[in-house]
Each structure stands twice: as structure tokens, then as C-alpha cells.
Image (cartoon, grey):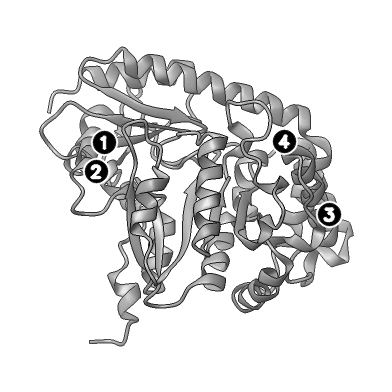
Amino acid sequence: MEPINPHLRATFAPPVMQARRWLTGVTFPANRPLINVSQAAPVEPPPKGLRAAIADAALNETAAHLYGPVLGNPELRDAIAMEFSRSYGGAVRTGQVAITQGCNQAFCAAINSLARTGDEVILPVPWYFNHKMWLDMQGISVRPLSCEPDMLPDPAAAERLIGPKSRAIVLVTPNNPSGAEYPATLVGKFYELAKRHGLALILDETYRDFDSRSGAPHDLLTRPGWDETVIQLYSFSKAYRLTGHRVGAVITSAERLNEIEKFLDTVAISTSQLGQIGALWGMRNLGDWLAQERIEILDRRNATKQAILGLHGWKLKSAGAYFAWVEHPYAESSADLAPRMVAELGVLALPGTMFMPEADPLGARHFRLAFANIGGAGIAELAARLENFTP
């Protein structure tokens, strides 16, 4: 057998790529085009002004084509520090911010600064599958933390999972895949739990710009010494449609960033210059545009909630940001139903089994619906097709 890292071999295949293969050989008639609710990435390009800024930099700025600082361009780090200080009411310094090649890389960097093979990390389930994949690749054990019926994790249950090899607790809010928005008090309890046990709290806020609540979603950045416990992650992909440019951020202690710098220098050297230029332009110029995008996403969330609540037998567990987590009424597993829905309904959705441990029966009962890229008419059509599904 050819030599392959056994941890990598044991890691499951990328779920989105697997789901796309279900489309092979399927024809979608003009009167029933494909409804794709499998992935949350924006499908439209960035606003024209941002594209123009990137194009101008590509044509006229020599530095846009060269290596930059490993931890990111100072101007973008400054802007993030100021924005997070303002929006969270805390004090974030530039030296506590690093720029990464997307939020997935921010997570990988954070984990590599914390844990090694044989260590353990607590993940609420359903989990974001790329988080699980990276931990599997590193030989880091996952302790699954089951969520309550309202899709919120319980700190007391998390505490029972903590052992001598535990290194971190990971929270994603608004959540991928469930869409659940974690209350500030809940996030605070997890912070206190992590601090009490000497763990890191990794807080992935990729979808913070589409939170339905006004004001800061938590107060962690106002707490003295927050950076000794908190590793906060962010993505520009959803905010400014920069998925192809791969720009994310990690906010934590300067001491941890010294270690993360080693990881970033090894895997990418520096984040895309054009992506960073675009992100900074967006932060300076797209506040009103992003606010309108948020309103549109919240409208789609509300439409999705009403549509699912009107379906016979289906149950809406939670919805927020880009996602709805729904329970289906059929005896078959969602893993078997999902490919059939492509062929029979023209609907591409990810089964709950892609977000859960294999032994957890709840995965078979659920789907994740990523509604952000379909408007009101598409949501209504999705509901109509699900209503008429007869496995």
C-alpha cells in the first residue's frame, strides 16, 4: 500500500464535494430548475466598488503582488482591532489580530497552537464538518457535546466531558449548521468554564454580520485578561463576498500569535494581498451596503421559518444567519434521502449525518438547509417540493 498518513486516510471526504457528485447525470427541466441549499457561500461577486479597488491595486500597486507580513497587513489589522473594540465595547490591540487565508485557516492555526496528537477538543454537535476534519487529520480526539432541543449546548454537560487531555471548547455562533444564535449569557458561561479549567474557548463568528440581534453578541472582549482564554475567529467571505480571495482573522493574545505566526509562515507565508486590500476597502466603505445585506438575509430566514413551519410533518429546530436545521418526517435516513431529493425533487441539501458522529441517530433525522442564496420565491418553491416528497 502506498504511504499515506493514517490520520488523513481516516478523515471523511469533504461533504460539499460529495454532495456535488449527486448532480452527475441528473437533468433538471426548465420548469423545475435545481434549488441548491447545500452550501452557504455567496454566489454573487463583491460590489463593484470593491472589485474596482482590487483591480486598481492589481494594476498599480507593486506590493499587491509580493509577500506581505505573515500576520497580515498592518492597516487591515488596525481596522479589525478598532472595529472589534467598537462593536464589542472592549479593547482589542492590533497586536492581538492576525489575518489568515480564510476562517478555516484561522481555525487550523488556532488548533495547532493549542493541541497535538492525542489531545482532546470539545465540539458541540451538530458540528461544522471542516472543524471535525482538521481535528481528525491531526489525530486530535473530538469529545462531542450534544445540544439541547433548542440547539444550544449546555455548559454543565460540557464540563462533564473535560479530562486531563482537554485543550479547548469550540463554539460557532451564529451556528453552522443549525443557525442557532448563542445568547450572551451562554457564551459567558462557556468562557467561565474554559477559564476555570485552563482551556481555550475558540469562538467562530464567521456569520456575526448576519446575527438577528442588535448590539454586541457577547461581552467577552470587555473582560480583563480575555485574551488568555478567548480565540475569536472571523471571516470576510460572507460579509463582502470574498470567498475566492480567502481572508479571515484570528483575535487572541500577542503571545499566542507569536506561535501562530510559525504555522502561517509554513503553510501560506502570507495572506493574499488583493484579498486584504479588498477586505480593508470593504470595512471603510461598505457599512451601509452590509447592513442592507443583513436585512435581506434576515428576511430570507423569516421566510424559511414560515415555510418550514407550514410543512406537514417537518420540524424547524433552529434558523439563523445562513442556515435552518430541520427534522424530516420519514423513516429513511437523511443520508439516503438527500441523493433522491436531487433526482426526484431537484433539491440539493446536506443530510444531518454529515454534521454528526456516525453513531448518533439524530443525524439521520435532520437536514441543513442553506437558504441565503435563494430569495422568497425560491424558498416558497423549496417548501412546495418538500411538501410533495413521498419517499
Which image quadrant is residue 264 in?
A: bottom right
Residue to which mark 4 is pinned: 47
Residue 241 appears left or right of 163: right
The kind of residue tagged 2 is Gly
Whole-number angstrom distance, CA of label 3 to CA of label 4: 23 Å
Whole-number angstrom distance, CA of label 4 to CA of label 2: 37 Å
Which image quadrant is residue 150 in?
A: top left
Which of 85/71 is in front?
85
Residue to which mark 3 is pinned: 78
Marker disc for residue 6: none
The answer to which of marks 3 and 1 sits earlier in the sequence is 3
The kind of residue tagged 4 is Pro
Whole-number angstrom distance, CA of label 3 to CA of label 1: 42 Å
The answer to which of marks 1 and 4 sits earlier in the sequence is 4
Disc 3 secondary structure class: helix
The kind of residue tagged 3 is Asp
Residue 294 appears left or right of 304: right
Which of 118/104 is in front?
118
Residue to which mark 1 is pinned: 366
The residue at 18%/44% (across/down) is: 361
Q: Position of residue 326 (x, y in %)?
A: 31, 30
